[in-house]
Amino acid sequence: MGNCSIGSRKLPIYCVDLSKKTNLDTSKKYVSISFDAAWGDEDTIKILDILDKYNIKTTFFMTGGWVDSYPDKVLEIYNRGHDLGNHSQNHKEMSKLSVGEQKDEIMSVANKIKEITGYTSFLFRPPYGDYNSTLIDTVYGCNFYPIEWDVDSLDWKDYGTDNIIKTVTTHKALKNGSIILMHNGAKYTAEALESVITGLQSQGYEIVPVSQLINTENFHMDGTGLQIPD
């Protein structure tokens, strides 16, 4: 697929160099909003409705437990055109697992998503952002791309709506090619989302799903986790 190595280390994708991207207009700026779905479901439809209002597609990284609890929402997310990402079966620290256990954590969710929607998922986010080189090899070996983030909304800390908006839209790492972390089950995320979207748009960013942002072949990484096309 590409070269994920920096020396002896293997790195996931934190953000993307879009300067030579072939499927996007390089005269524009792009970011991805991603939602981790590991607990709660109360605001999922509200979030989807806001995304529909602005005709925006995003990426939902779902645990196997969430998929088991809310299969109807998995199908709803899919039917509304968003990426279905994989967030492991049991939300464990993946670097502490054996290769066999890592594969089971990944493929269990992949099979559930496939069964519900017919969709073959290919984006994986490790719980807690925790990884080692072994996991990165395992992820690629399962035909997934390992996805982190460079802009954390901190919505999971429940600091409030205004804090989420400010944290994302003024984040020091925010740039063309950034991946933004949010959670569909956090207390204030749905309330903040519309202002996050308009705040990003006012800075000239278009919002695309992670599947459109990343390079799926012919790439290499730098030491910060920036994915660079060859």
Image (spheres, rainbow, N blue to C red):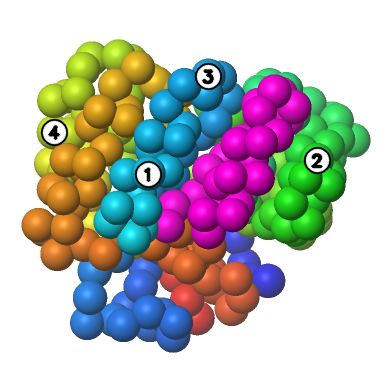
Give the quadrant of residue 127: top right
- Cα separation, mark 3 vs mark 1, equals 17 Å
| In the depicted structure, whether residue 54 falls above or below residue 71 | below
Mark 3 or mark 2: whose residue is earlier in sequence: 3
Cα separation, mark 1 vs mark 4, equals 22 Å
Amino acid type, callout 1: Asp
Q: How far is mark 1 from mark 2, CA to CA?
A: 25 Å
Residue plotted at (16% across, 50% down): 198
Q: What's the amino acid at mark 4?
A: Lys
Give me the residue at 59% from left, 54% from top: 79
Q: CA distance from mark 2 to mark 4?
A: 36 Å
Q: Is 163 drawn above or below residue 2 in the view shown?
A: above
- Closer to the camera, 160 or 12? 160
Q: Report helix, strand or loop for mark 4.
A: helix
Between tags 4 and 3, which lies in front?
3
Locate residue 27, reporting x and y percent: 22, 82
Mark 1 vs mark 4, foreground winner is 1
Q: Residue 13 location, x and y as percent?
A: 50, 53
Label annotation for residue 215: none
Mark 3 lies on a secondary structure that is: loop
Identity, as a three-letter code, of the amino acid under mark 2:
Lys
Q: CA distance from mark 4 to mark 3?
A: 24 Å
Which stretch did the figure color magenta?
Answer: 57-83
Is residue 154 something one can see in this rendering?
Answer: no
Which residue was labeled with disc 2? 112
Residue, disc 4: 166
Per the rendering, the mark at residue 40 is 3
